[in-house]
Image (cartoon, rainbow, N blue to C red):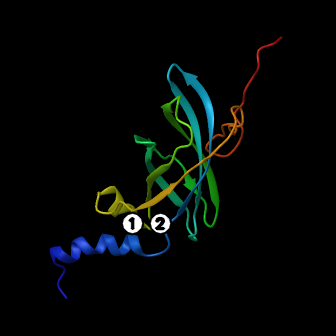
């Protein structure tokens, strides 16, 4: 069998389709700060990795109440684990309940998938949507380092 241009275009799609895609769950939104007529929120999402290999996240693209937001994802999800992310979202201060829809791009596990991703042939994504539960100000989760530890915060002497 000869490899044709048609096969070359179908191969990345088939490789990305192999296995199970991660699952993204919108958990809640916590108001962080009000700046003039804008409100900053911490949008809390969970990413579930159903695979037996680690999952490298690439980027977030969201539409929150009509505003387009893009963030680079710099996390790896361990095999068969779940991580929680806090994504900043800025909306008009008058926004009450709001909805989110978006995509998370990731690198499918495997050396060949790494090569296809780096060359631009395969960019798998998973779509998600929902309405976050609105929490009270001050309920935002504490920031964590990439390794999951708490930051070393030193308070000034009193």
Residue tagged by mark 1? Answer: 113
Q: Quick one: 74 or 24, which is closer to the camera? A: 24
- The image position of residue 75, as x and y in percent, is 54, 49
Who's the residue at 23% across and 71% down the image? 9
User: How far across and down, in percent of the image, does residue 127 sit?
Assistant: 44, 60
Work out how far the residue at label 2 is from the one at label 1, CA to CA, in angstroms: 6 Å
* Front-lying residue, 151 or 105: 105
Q: Position of residue 150 (x, y in %)?
A: 72, 38
SS of the residue under disc 2: loop
Q: In terms of image quadrants, where is residue 34?
A: top right
Quadrant of image for the N terminus: bottom left
Q: Which residue is rendered at x = 28% and y = 62% of the image?
A: 121
- Confirm or deny contact between disc 2 and disc 1 (CB under 8 A): yes
Tell me the number on the disc at residue 5.
none
Q: Residue 80 in the image: state x and y as whole percent.
A: 63, 67
Q: Nearer the viewer, residue 44 or 144?
A: 44
């Amino acid at each position: 069998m000869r490899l044709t241009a048609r096969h070359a275009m179908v191969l990345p799609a088939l490789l990305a389709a192999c296995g199970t895609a991660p699952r993204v769950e919108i958990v809640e939104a916590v108001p962080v700060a009000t700046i003039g007529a804008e409100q900053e929120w911490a949008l809390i999402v969970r990413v579930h990795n159903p695979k037996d290999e680690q999952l490298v996240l690439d980027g977030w693209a969201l539409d929150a109440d009509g505003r387009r937001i893009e963030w680079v994802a710099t996390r790896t999800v361990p095999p068969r684990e779940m991580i929680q992310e806090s994504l900043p979202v800025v909306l008009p201060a008058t926004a009450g309940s709001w909805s989110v829809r978006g995509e998370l791009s990731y690198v499918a596990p495997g050396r060949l998938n790494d090569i296809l991703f780096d060359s631009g042939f395969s960019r798998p994504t998973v779509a998600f949507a929902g309405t976050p539960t609105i929490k009270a100000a001050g309920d935002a989760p504490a920031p964590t380092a990439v390794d999951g530890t708490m930051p070393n915060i030193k308070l000034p002497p009193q």
